[in-house]
Image (tube, rainbow, N blue to C red):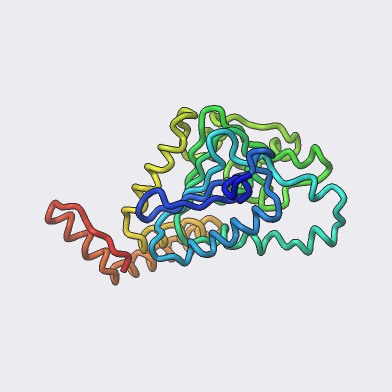
Amino acid sequence: MTDHDECPVLLDRPEPGVARLTLNRPRVNNALSLELQALLSEHFLALGNDPEIRCILLTGGDTVFAAGGDISSMADTGAIDIYQRHTERVWAPIQHCPKPVIAAICGYAYGGGCELAMHADILIAGESAQFCQPEIRIGIMPGIGGTQRLVRAVGKAKAMQMALTGKPISAQDAWVGGLVSEIVPDDQVQAHALSQARLIARMPPLAAEQIKEVILAGMDASLEAGLALERKANALLFASNDQKEGMSAFIEKRKPRFQGD
């Protein structure tokens, strides 16, 4: 095998301001091994702090996003060992990444793969994509946010059905339920997701980060608290050079040049 084959997460920069992370365990449908999770964590931490990166594209490739956790590493593991893995710490850089994250989803997004996809801000799914939380079928339950993010995305009734039956839902059902942002033909997923990343990377990064922060914080706040966060974040952006550039470009009918300051 080549180094490319052996590395479970590939990083490239296909466009200015865009980083792409590709899950790369095709032989096991991108099962989320401990090594893969650790590498994702490291990459998200570094990219979140990289001023050159304005958007992160996360994908499993053209066939499958991720078919779930690595069951072989969990089958004979005890409760304390599972607890001491502290997946919440491993996944924290993904959860708290300040940069916009786009997931390009082809094929299965099952179990941990579905939970990983739900960490993204924009989910682009292929027409044949499927989403599932099948953990109950092997005697456990979602453990990386599946019960919590799923109910926030699709509501109680659909989340209960998915988690209690372990049955997958189609891309169309996921879109109707609010789990994904957009559905495109399978062969256009990667190109379309990259075009979205390119578009966001050209936006003022301070505004993008504030929009992401306020939307996520406001989801679990009261309306009044969320509106207060919005007002203050919006006022803060008026101290940026990008605000001056954006409004000047609009008035002068030219394309803005956002520098991120």
Image coords of residue 250 (percent x, y): 18, 54
> Toward the viewer: 259 or 52?
52
Query: From this viewpoint, is residue 150 visible?
Result: no
Taking the view exactly as shown, the residue that stands out farthest to the front is 1
> Toward the viewer: 132 or 8?
8
User: Residue at position x 43%, y 61% from top?
Assistant: 227
Image coords of residue 77 (percent x, y): 85, 54
Which quadrant, please, contains the N terminus? top right
Quarter of the view holding residue 53: bottom left
Which quadrant, please, contains the C terminus? bottom left
Q: Is residue 47 left or right of residue 139?
A: left
> Toward the viewer: 174 or 47?
47
Image coords of residue 7 (percent x, y): 61, 51
Q: Is residue 125 left or right of residue 149?
A: left
> Toward the viewer: 12 or 172?
12
Taking the view exactly as shown, the residue that stands out farthest to the left is 252
Relative vertical location of residue 198 with respect to residue 240 in this rendering, above or below: above
Quarter of the view holding residue 45: bottom right
Relative vertical location of residue 55 with respect to residue 181 in this rendering, above or below: below
User: Residue at position x 56%, y 27% from top?
Assistant: 128
User: Residue at position x 65%, y 53% from top?
Assistant: 36
User: Residue at position x 61%, y 62% from top?
Assistant: 92
Query: From this viewpoint, is residue 21 visible?
Result: yes
Number of numbered discs visible in the structure rendering:
0
Relative vertical location of residue 83 with respect to residue 32 in this rendering, above or below: below
Image coords of residue 174 (percent x, y): 56, 35
